[in-house]
Image (cartoon, rainbow, N blue to C red):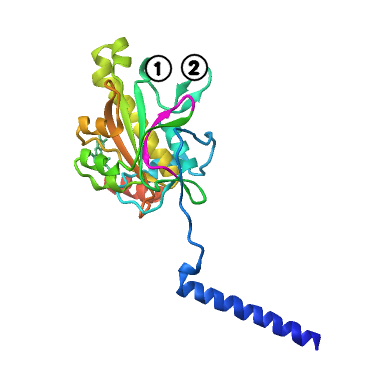
Amino acid sequence: MRVVRVGYLISGLVSLALILYILNLIYPYYQTPTEVVLVTYDVIYLPLPKKVSNVSVEEAILWRRSVRDYAKDPIRLEDLSMILWATYGVTEPTWGFRATPSAGATYPLEIYLVVGEEGVLIDGNAYLVAGVYKYDGRKHLLRLVKQGDFREELYVAAIKQEWVRNAPVSIVICAVFERTTSVYGVRGEVRYVPMEVGHAGQNIYLMSTALGYGAVVVGAFIDEDVSKVINAGVNEVPMYIVPIGVPKTPYRTTFKDIENYIIKARGG
Ligand SMILES: Cc1cc2nc3c(=O)[nH]c(=O)nc-3n(C[C@H](O)[C@H](O)[C@H](O)COP(=O)(O)O)c2cc1C
């Protein structure tokens, strides 16, 4: 008799679970709505850099592509932390040398970040407030420059390149030329500083690829307008805008494909 009652109870519970499951499919709003929590601080201490990816440097180079089409997903703060560290973070603790080489270690670059609404996921359902931030590589933190979603303004300044508007975040690399030209003169201006921007840009590409994101370096923009958007200092010249997001279709190829390409290029 008791066995029969337990049987009824179990089948009743299973039926109830089934009904709740079906109801949830039909009326997904039965779920507790996820509350979006925005986090505003003037200083954001980024998660400390550490080894996080299992993508080798060969794979990151193989899979790096300029990505201009992004899904709606945000960038996770811990991933953003790694991308910024790769851009201009410290990799040598005695002198504070950075992830990118620098002529005479003059370090002319300043790194800004334009964060869109719900562009950076901190944890669970908490997002970094939209705004312009400046990266401090020595302390590995972000300082809020101004609050608000400035992607539209950045997009206009970047002669309306859609990916600048759509990316959840864009890094803006600026250069203070005097830091390098005061040591190397005009060679610092026409060679060393632009070369260093390229190094930083490539690091962004590779770290983004390794973490499952896609980026594109954007060099076509109106300098003065970009400077206004990010509140750049008078001697800070914007050099690159680098939108970053989750690719709609991640680019993948294999070394076998490349081998075939090379053999064909060699004439069979
Ligand atoms: C100096 C420089 C400036 C660039 N400027 C832009 C740009 O303004 N907009 C853009 O969509 N891509 C820009 N790119 C990306 C190139 O279009 C891209 O690297 C090229 O098409 C090769 O594709 P890949 O990066 O996927 O190999 C730029 C690249 C470099 C190196």
Callout 2: CB less than 8 Å from ligand 1 = no
Residue at the outermost right position: 1
* Residue at position x 40%, y 26% in the image: 100
Dot 1 or dot 2: first in sequence order is: 2
Q: Position of residue 227 (x, y in %)?
A: 26, 30
**How many numbered marks have been drawn onto this rendered protein structure?**
2
- In magenta, the rendered stretch is 128-139
Q: Position of residue 187 (x, y in %)?
A: 25, 15
Q: In the structure shown, which secondary structural element does the residue marked by tag 1 occupy?
A: helix
Residue nearest the viewer, comparing 160 with 257: 160
| Residue hosting label 1 | 105
Circle 1/circle 2 CB separation < 8 Å: yes
Ligand 1 occupies quarter: top left
Q: On screen, 108 above or below 123?
A: above
Q: In the structure shown, which secondary structural element does the residue marked by tag 2 occupy?
A: loop
| Residue hosting label 2 | 95
Give amino acid for label 2.
Trp
